Amino acid sequence: MKLSVGLALLGVLFSLNGGFAVPVAIAADSPPMDDADKEKIRQIVKDAIREYVAAQHVVPDKGGANGILADIRLANRNFVRTHGPGYFKPFLDSQHPRATVITCSDSRVHTHALDATPDGDLFMVRNIGNQMSTAEGSVEYGVHHLHTPLLLIVGHSACGAIKAAAGDYSQESAPIRRELDTLQVPKGDPGMNSIKLNVNYQVGAARAKFEREVSDGQLTVVGAIYDFSNEMRQGQGKLNIINVNGETDATKIAALDLMKEAPVRKPIAARHRPASRKAKVEADATPESTDEPTKPKH
Ligand SMILES: [Zn+2]
């Protein structure tokens, strides 16, 4: 099947009913799907298209700004349809993220790989090369004002910024050169070794900046690699923790309490919603909820 034909057939699924059409054969024998189910299927089809295009070894046609913005507006319409006012209620007045995360701007690296419910959980700082120095104010805001107990620095496999920094980037523009100058990687070594070196370097920079918070136990700085190409042979897409407060020995890291499995917490929206009237009365009678830390509003 030619690429254009394949995409045209798959594209039929997106054409009607606010951008999504249910195949007639399925719709005739099945109960009507709600918006959340439609969104799930839309995502599956989107993933299938991505895999199909990747299998053809061609660079996909980006479709121009109009097409991309149309897709974004459609995705947002579906988001609005599937998220009621209750979902946003916990976010209206303040935020209480659980971690400040520095990661690369790379489009292949996103929060859903780290957190199934990132809304309200992760204070995200992104730049090329997942670095401290070009986003110091943002990182400081997360640690000092939002009081996140975890600062997570995430590098990733096949990082273009590391590759560029390890080579000759003298022909780049001044702003790009400035952001590559702050990456400390050896010339001629553009791969995983430099990606790890950079994460360790950034953890060191963070520990130096937040020395008091780390020594007081208020902050833990963790360095990790999101390995979507499985270069580290730990599983494709695995988040490999390589540095905890400067400790880089894998055996010692594995033995830390930090690495033990913890109970899964509910998404923040669910945490704010009492399960029943009785639960609400009990929650109201409790002077301090232990579920949600008390933090200043911002
Ligand atoms: Zn990158």
Image (cartoon, rainbow, N blue to C red):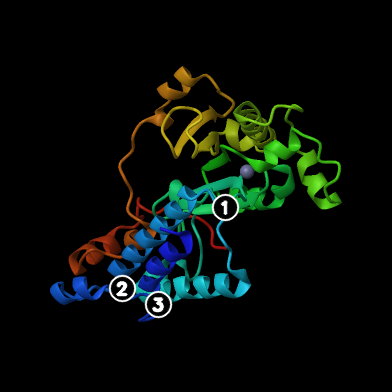
Q: Is residue 144 above or below residue 84?
A: above
Identity, as a three-letter code, of the amino acid under mark 2: Asp
Tell me the CA gap for discs 3 and 2. 16 Å
Q: Mark 1 sits on what residue?
A: 107
Answer whether residue 255 is visible to the viewer in this image. yes
* Labels 3, 2: front one: 3
Which quadrant contains ligand 1? top right
Q: Nearer the viewer, residue 154 or 106?
A: 106
Q: Secondary structure at mark 1?
A: loop
Packing grade of label 3 (10 A; few <14, some 14-19, many >=20) is: few
The image quarter in which residue 211 lies: top right
- Measured as percent of width and height from the top left, residue 171 is found at 85, 45
Packing grade of label 2 (10 A; few <14, some 14-19, many >=20) is: some
Q: Mark 3 sits on what residue?
A: 15
At a point 26% along the width and 73% down the height, the residue shown is 23
Tell me the CA gap for discs 1 and 3. 26 Å
Q: Mark 2 sits on what residue?
A: 35
At a point 31% along the width and 70% down the height, the residue shown is 38
Q: Nearer the viewer, residue 275 or 50?
A: 50
- Measured as percent of width and height from the top left, residue 274 is found at 27, 64
Identity, as a three-letter code, of the amino acid under mark 1: Ser
Point out the residue furthest to the bottom here.
17
Q: Secondary structure at mark 3?
A: loop
